[in-house]
Image (tube, grey):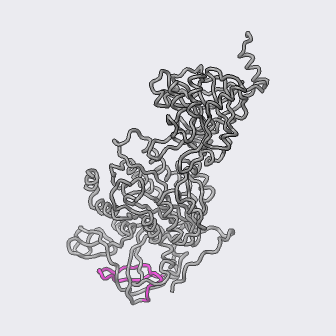
Amino acid sequence: MPANSLTSLAADLLSGRIRVVDLTQTLSPQFPQIALPPEFGQCWPFRIEEISRYDDRGSAWYWNNFSCGEHTGTHFDAPIHWVSGRDLPNNATDSLPVQQLIGAACVIDCSAPASADPDFLLTADYLKDWEAVHGRIPPRSWVLMRTDWSKRTDPVAYQNYDETGQHTPGPAVDAVRFLVDDRDVAGFGSEAIGTDAGQGYHLKPPYPCHYYMHGAGRYGLQCLKNLDLLPPTGAVIFCAPLKIKNGSGSPIRALALVPA
Amino acid sequence: MIPPLVRPDRKNPFVRTRQPLLPPWVRSRAALGLTAAAALGRFELQVCGDCGAVQYPPREMCHRCLTGTLRWREQSGTGELIAETTVHHSNDLYFRERVPWRLGLVRLDAGPTAVVHLHGGCPPAPGRVRVGARLDKSGQGVLLAFPIDEVPNMADDPLMREMSCNPQFRKVLVTDGKTGVGQAVVRAIIDAGADLVWVGYAEPWKKLPGLAALEALPQVALLPLDLTDSGSVRQTAAEIGGRVDILINTAEVHRAQGIASRNGIEVARTEMDVNYFGLLRLAQEFGPVMRSRGADGQSSATAWVNLLSVYALTNFPPHGTFSASKAAALSLSQCLRAEMRAAGVRVINVFPGPIDDEWNQTLPPPKLTPDSLARAVVTALKDGVEDIYPGDVAQEWLARWEESPKVLEREISTY
């Protein structure tokens, strides 16, 4: 077999020179799902029912049925998810180009400002400051917003609701425009329950990351974890959604390859 | 004098828990009319449509004119206690454990003479009494004589403890404390003397008013419980199931929609998931352990209360999918009732009309306040009835439904 970059990748994986980092929250009934006002349709939480467990329902085998929404747990948003991306070609989970589901990751560390302010908005200037240190964000790379929000293991703290809604960090309007228009990224990923900030409904336009990313045929990743284990640059992520016909998204097992 | 109920001592862990036994439960089809009325808290006897004779015991035909146009009609129950006896020995297993037991012979003012259980407050024979019908441990209707005037500690008579589900000194699980109804039920059940009330709440990140105030009550223990999650129900039953004497299922999802007013089945499925499957999950996990404690001393497991809706009787099309989920729950509750019967644990169904909450905002009054609903639940427990229809709307629907389900369906469908 002639050597190429893939054979060397396989060898590096085998030897541990490249590590695989799991960026995925465990799918469990306790993990919270996005909540909309009660009169709207709702996303299903993850639920699981035992079919049999080596018992009278099936003597030698254990298995479950589970149910969840397309946007439950660590998940992928396809462009068709948002009204701005509804008419794009190849905008759904079954039709989008799989070439883009594996790519380089730029990890923007926002953990300090997000811990000081749950409503922290990542601005274009913040991204430019990051580029000044780590270099220009390459085209078709994945930009991941590290906030350490995933370390909030209590669902109440993770959701962080009060009477005025949810308070979680996300990107500002100018940051999303910068990433889409000037840097041509593949998508944007966050640790919180949405790619947009909890108060993103009050930005102009509402939910700018959904609006501009999906409007430009780009993707979203939510509920990621372990972003603190990734280098600012140099990691490659795998984030393929299930091939749901005309699906708007899907829970994923998000993985990253990082140099050891 | 009836001594007041006192808080029972802690259970001796070396004494085997008494197994539930039932009084004789076999009834003729005709006699089940007495049970049907008692289930609603009514005392009814057969009245002949031809000659007007009132008869007891129930029969297929009028004992006087032998025609068959018998109707069950509510009775005042007043009469003369003409003789009484106290049973000190019985070969029946249930009564054997409960002697001495007072029985009497009452000549009802309406005509018939009946053998009845005697409440401890009844005067010695001869004397005036008021006969009423109650459901016994087997769930069948029996006749009891009460004193004409209230005496102190009426409800504490051992006979009443057998034939009611009094919350006093009992431990209660209210499955959803986030709703106005759930919170009102918690307060009412504490006012009725419950020792401990576990209050379930789902989706802890959704903060709704009132839950924190409940937590401040010394009798209340909050616990996470989500009826859509089988694992959560199983966990809760494992943790507290062996101590729950009364389970009150207040969890429900209610959306105001028919078939045509909303596309898709998602909301209807959520209603079914909580209102029907939620009950099924609870019944599978809490049913067995509550059955095992049906005779566990003075504070045995005694009742299971389902918050249904009068729309379970006939569909209210503006809330059509909700109605269907409650009809499904009603059907399942009958299965639960059959399965709990052997343990003497009563299944009480509550059929309120529209409750004064956000999902009935656009319905005109009269609407039932959560407090009135909660009081009705406590009364049902104290009276040991099976089905209650609290509020004016529910009472009217019930009367019309008893008269003709089809007429009611037509009237409601042209609402």
Q: Position of residue B312 (x, y in %)?
A: 37, 54
B182 lies left or right of B400: right
Q: Residue at x 65, y 72 (%)?
A: B10
- Kindly give the residue lying farthest to the top in the view shown: A2
Looking at the image, is B295 positioned above or below residue B152?
above
Question: Residue B407 versus residue B80: which sits nearer the camera?
Answer: B407
Count of numbered tags: 0
Looking at the image, is B368 positioned above or below residue A118?
below
Q: Which residues are magenta?
A: B102-124
B342 lies left or right of B326: right
Q: Position of residue B399 (x, y in %)?
A: 30, 63
Q: Is residue A157 visible?
A: yes
Question: Residue B170 versus residue B30: which sits nearer the camera?
Answer: B170
Q: Residue at x 55, y 41 (%)?
A: A199
Taking the magenta stretch, the answer to whether it contains residue B114 is yes
Question: Residue A58 versus residue A17: which sits nearer the camera?
Answer: A17
Q: Is residue B23 visible?
A: no
Tell me which corner region of the image, top left, top right, bottom left or bottom right, holds residue B96: bottom right
- Kindly give the residue lying farthest to the left in the view shown: B50
Q: Residue at x 54, y 28 (%)?
A: A213
Q: Position of residue A148 (x, y in %)?
A: 68, 39
Looking at the image, is B394 positioned above or below residue B98?
above
Looking at the image, is B115 positioned above or below residue A170?
below
B127 lies left or right of A169: left
Taking the magenta stretch, the answer to whether it contains residue B277 is no
Q: Position of residue B26 (x, y in %)?
A: 42, 66
